[in-house]
Image (cartoon, rainbow, N blue to C red):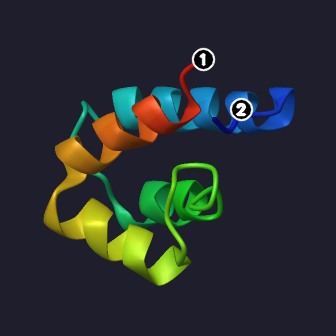
Amino acid sequence: MATLSTAEKADIAYLIEYQRGNYDTPLDSFVAERLSVLHAKFGYDSQIVYLEALRDAPHRTLLQSLLAVSA
């Protein structure tokens, strides 16, 4: 299974705080784009496919991403 680096974890932590500041509204394009650069670690072959998954099924996609990097 893939693991996230300290810098990648820090970036995700920043995105969590960013979302909290926006009152946990649905993922906006800023968050989706920043997460999509980690698509391979989340088990996706393509950044575009990951972005589409975040758009079409954000909750399921994020949960699957968690499983992909869990130890």
Give above or below for 5 relative to 50. Answer: above
Judged from the image, the secondary structure of the residue bearing numbered disc 1 is loop
Name the residue type under label 1: Ala
Frontmost residue, 10 versus 38:
38
Frontmost residue, 22 versus 47:
47
Per the rendering, the mark at residue 3 is 2
Task: Determine whether, in the image, residue 62 is placed left or right of residue 59.
Answer: right
Counting from the top left corner in percent of width and height, residue 29 is at 40, 67
Q: Quadrant of the C terminus?
A: top right
Which residue is labeled 1 in the image? 71
Task: Determine whether, in the image, residue 51 is placed left or right of residue 27.
Answer: right
Specify whether residue 8 is in view: yes
Q: Are the residues tagged 2 and 1 within 8 Å (C-beta)?
A: yes
Judged from the image, the secondary structure of the residue bearing numbered disc 2 is loop
Give above or below for 41 relative to 49. Answer: above
Counting from the top left corner in percent of width and height, residue 35 is at 54, 54
Tell me how far mark 2 sits from mark 1, CA to CA.
Answer: 8 Å
Taking the spot 25% from the left edge, 33% from the top edge, the residue there is 24
Query: Which picture quadrant has residue 64?
Result: top left
